[in-house]
Amino acid sequence: MADILGLDALLGQMMTALGLAMVAGNGFAMWKHARGEGPEGAKGAYRPGRVRFLLGVGLVISIWGLAGILT
């Protein structure tokens, strides 16, 4: 059943998309903070350690997903 539906490839594509979304979102947050801008109406401080950690996690997930697709 998994071969018919192509679930192995779908899982790799979903992991890649999730990882790239994490990289894009956290990269955008770093870029906005570097420009001195912040989200309107949001409370809380910018946490660079958290942003870098989540950027790294997203990069690992996206590489893992790409490796799953290519193998």
Image: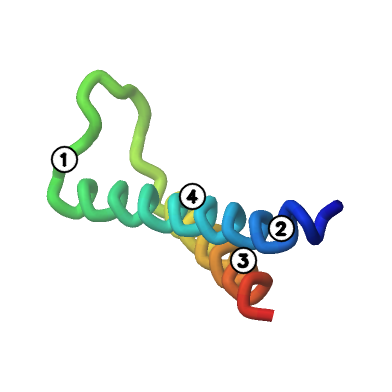
> Mark 2, mark 1: which one is toward the viewer?
2
Rendered image: mark on residue 50: 4
- Amino acid on which disc 4 is placed: Arg
Q: Residue 28: where, in percent of width, then height?
A: 29, 51
Name the secondary structure under disc 4. Answer: helix
Instruction: Tell me where residue 42 appears, x and y as whole percent.
Output: 30, 23
Q: Which residue is mark 2?
A: 6
Image quadrant where residue 45 sits: top left
Q: Is residue 27 left or right of residue 18?
A: left
Q: Which mark is residue 37?
A: 1
Most foreground residue, 4 or 31: 4
Location of residue 69 with respect to 25 vertically, above or below: below
The tag earlier along the polypeptide, 4 or 1, is 1
Most extreme residue toward the bottom is 71
- Residue type marked 3: Gly
Residue 65 coordinates in the image, percent (x, y): 62, 66
Q: Nearer the observer, disc 2 or disc 4?
A: 2
Mark 1 secondary-structure assignment? loop
| Classed neighbour count for the residue bearing mark 2: other residues with Cα under 10 Å, few (<14), some (14–19), many (≥20) | few
Mark 3 and mark 1: span between their CA atoms?
Answer: 32 Å
Q: Which residue is mark 3?
A: 65
Is label 4 or label 3 in front? 3
The residue that appears at 50% across and 54% down in the rendered structure is: 17
Q: Earlier in the sequence, mark 3 or mark 1?
A: 1
At label 1, which amino acid type do we have?
Answer: Glu
* Cα distance in 3D space between marks 2 and 4: 35 Å
**Which residue appears at 38% of the width and 51% of the height?**
26
Which of labels 3 and 2 is toward the front? 2
- Residue type highlighted by circle 2: Gly
User: Does dot 2 land on a helix, a strand or a loop?
Assistant: loop
Left or right of 46 on screen, residue 59: right
The CA span between labels 4 and 3 is 22 Å
